[in-house]
Image (spheres, rainbow, N blue to C red):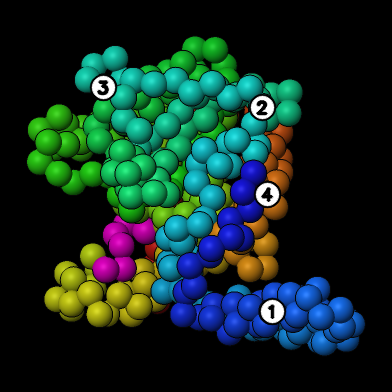
Amino acid sequence: MNSGKESVPALDFEQPLLDIERKIRELQEFSRKEGFDVTGELEALDRRARDVQRDIYSRLTPWQRVALARHPNRPYTLDLVGAMAEGFVELRGDRQFRDDPALIGGVGFIGKRRVVFLGHQKGRSTRESIKRNFGCPHPEGYRKAARLMRLADKFRLPLVCLIDTPGAYPGVEAEERGQAHAIAENLRLMLGLKVPIVVVVIGEGGSGGALGIGVGDRIIILENAYYSVISPEGCAAILWKTKDKAPEAARALKLTPNELLELKIVDEVIPEPLTGAHRNWEKTAELVKEAVTASLDRLEKLPTRILVYRRQEKYRKIGIYGEK
């Protein structure tokens, strides 16, 4: 699988690291052509690169984490499923209107365990992004998801949901086909499913578009993903009438993994490879697989009645707070 390392678009805060990596490549090429031993210089640059990596990625701001969550080379749902699962078979269509490529689902194996996968899917090229509607599902996407949720429940298969969407598609045609109802129906359905549900936020977790497949027994999030009721730009446009305040909105929204863990909205944060998931797909997929497997191992030991009760209680408690 492509590691995502080639042609990585540079984010502003990553530029010092990319400059060092460029110098390393130039020095390696010089050594190859001229036959000079530059081992000492390369080792020094490698040490410098590691120091810069730790410095950059250990003090990311919320807005910088949002940028990483949106990185175009970040692994998407099909990338991770392809690395984690064996024998994955995609199932299409909502049996009412059409198939929605922005939300994919199917059946596959994680180890010896058969599971049903659901996930938002973005595109990489312009053509694919348009086909996938930039990862923003229509109502038929959520109805397809509901069909596969019922399939999982019928055959007692665990459900694994991968979240990566700016939000559900807000267009007129989506509203005409019942966008809000489709998402609400999924919330009701997932709260009552009698199988374990593990949700992993792998990139953007935007509003009801994320929550439409996001009700689970265990909510996991990658270190450089975010989960929020609204995008920072949307929040800034409402509160300050300008998108220039998006970094300030990102801080106020408490959308970063550690903040979400403190608020008990998520249950676990998966540390990404040091330089981010967009630069190491294989390791990211391995870490996600380990977290999902460990969660399912625990959840499958619970009696069904306790599993469903705890899930419902989990969501009843979100948003409860006290003031001094």
Q: Which mark is residue 282?
A: 4
Q: Provide the secondary structure element on which disc 3 rests.
A: loop
Q: Residue at x 65, y 57 (%)?
A: 280
Q: Is residue 176 magenta?
A: no
Q: Amino acid at mark 3?
A: Arg
Picture coordinates of residue 104 (x, y %)? Answer: 42, 32
Q: Amino acid at mark 1?
A: Glu
Foreground tag (3 vs 1): 1
Query: Could you give the CA–CA distance between mark 4 and mark 2, rounded to whole angstroms?
Result: 15 Å
Q: Amino acid at mark 2?
A: Glu
Picture coordinates of residue 227 (x, y %)? Answer: 42, 57
Q: Are marks 1 and 4 in contact (CB under 8 Å)?
A: no
Q: Provide the secondary structure element on which disc 2 rests.
A: strand
Q: Residue furthest top?
A: 154
Query: Could you give the CA–CA distance between mark 3 and mark 2, rounded to whole angstroms?
Result: 27 Å
Between discs 1 and 4, the one toward the N terminus:
1
Between discs 3 and 1, the one toward the N terminus:
1
| 185 to the left or right of 324 | left
Q: Provide the secondary structure element on which disc 4 rests.
A: helix
Q: Which mark is residue 98?
A: 3
Instruction: Work out whether residue 21 can be spotted.
Output: yes
Q: Does residue 277 lie above or below 189 as drawn?
A: below
Q: Which mark is residue 47?
A: none
Residue named by callout 2: 86
Picture coordinates of residue 65 (x, y %)? Answer: 48, 69
Between discs 2 and 1, the one toward the N terminus:
1
Span colored in magenta = 228-233
Query: Could you give the CA–CA distance between mark 3 and mark 1, rounded to whole angstroms?
Result: 51 Å
| 53 to the left or right of 154 | right
Residue named by callout 1: 26
